[in-house]
Amino acid sequence: LSATSKAAIDAYVDGINAYLATNPPLSLEFQLLGFSPEPWTPADVMVWAKMMAFNLTKNRKTELERYRLLAKGLSQARIAQLMPLYPENGPALFSFAFKRILSLQGIASVKSDKKQAEALLAMMKRLPTFAGASNNWVLGGSRTTSGKPLLANDPHLALGIPSTWHLMHLEASDYNVIGATLPGLPCIIIGRNTHIAWGVTNVGADVEDFYVLQETDDGNGYLYKNQVKPYQIRTETIHVKGSPSVKLNVRETIYGPVISDVVEDIPEAAPLALRWMGHHPVDTTVEAYFALNQAQNWIEFKAAMKHYVVPSQNFVYADVKGNIGYFAPGLLPIRKPSHTGLYPMPGNGEWDWQGFIPFEELPEMFNPEQDYIFTANHNITPPDYPYTISVEWTGSGNYRAARIEQKIRSQEKHSLTDMLALQLDTISLLYQDFVPVLQQITPTSAQGQQWRERLLAWDGNMSLDSQEATVFQTWYV
């Protein structure tokens, strides 16, 4: 980080610790757990940002699930039916036909790998889950009643204690920025200053890959590019209240940690290493937010994005001069054509990442002809794009994106009240797609027939007091 950013983090940390030194009253969680917070450190600031990046990256779970199904004996074609990718005709930010990857290649797996994948998936279920279904959009002046841009953001993350977000206003003689941030970070993640405003949703870029290692007979290394690479061992100490500390030896590879070591050793199962962009040795994402908070125009906004590493986000932008824009920053890996990121690959050097998408070629949009931009975790790949960002866009993003555009195009001009109404909209396009399925169902019970008729007469409004919404959601899930 730059000296300026380091100084800002140090000052923020000093402020937190000065407050803790006053022995302030602690919230209920601390009282119930009998826990007093340790002094905050600059490393805590950086690690908390990493944790958010880890929570917003989902590919590891689906990659393991496909690995499990493959080891169970299913073909890749059958797995594709059970775990369908984003629809080819689904909404796309740049409005083009989604190019389906036809060449799928993975690694052969055996029954022992199935047990290992199941154990890892079970371990993942013990971690906190975070719902992800964020939306944002920005309208140019030609589409608003005021003639000025309107930007809205609605990040859907799981409720938690403490909250994922809190509101913060930072003000100094030449600094005025307000918005939402993560507790423990000294900058605004979503918000505005006196010149620009911005909002984010998760891109869902595939920045994780599992690699299956060919381990040496003595277990001290693995084969990489026809050479034996020794594991690098580091020891992590986990302090446990009321019990002895636990020491964990972590085996590191050229790809990253041997993630399969977190579960019980399964004979004959090959070790799995995880490569994740969050492990990149240089991560200046916090620097990007410091620069973003002070940006005054599109050029300075894009300059801030150059520092961004992970997690890749869909940034929508507006400024006081009437400009609107979009940018998807981050280090996004380039893979070989047959490496889709859907399955673990051999960790022998043949399937390594080929670098990262150049900054100048990352998806962006500035003052588009339609004068609006929206994202909902859906496909953001530009037309004829030479790189694969993901093939697993959030499934619900398909419907949310379609509904947002439907509402934007439903009237010529929008006000602030209209923006709020859109954020609170509860119409389900998913239900409308399922109406033909409901029409073909012939329930065998009188109650089933009654509910079929009620659902067919329903308008798909998922309002809080709708019994039809509850029944439909239960049936669908």
Image: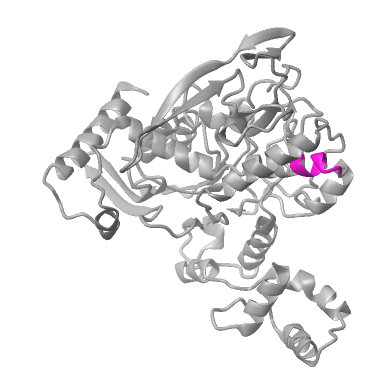
Residue 291 horizontal side relative to residue 459, left or right = left
Residue beneath the point at 73% across and 42% down: 391
- Which residue is drawn at the image coordinates 54% and 49% (left, top)? 126
Q: Does the magenta stretch include residue 84?
A: no
Residue 452 visible, this orientation = yes
Q: Nearer the viewer, residue 308 or 437?
A: 437
Rendered image quadrant of residue 406 = bottom right
Residue 366 at x, y = what percent? 58, 42
Q: Does the magenta stretch include residue 71?
A: yes
Choose between 371 and 109: the one closer to the eye.
109
Q: Which residue is drawn at 34% across and 47% down?
A: 183
Residue 269: x %, y % from top left: 72, 30
Q: In this view, does 290 lie to the left or right of 76?
A: left
Q: Nearer the viewer, residue 113 or 192?
A: 113
What range is drawn magenta here? 67-73
From the image, which quarter does the N terminus lie in? top left
Q: Is residue 282 above or below residue 187?
A: above
Is the residue 264 above or below the residue 220 in the image?
below
Q: State the image coordinates of residue 64 (x, y, percent, origin top left).
A: 70, 40
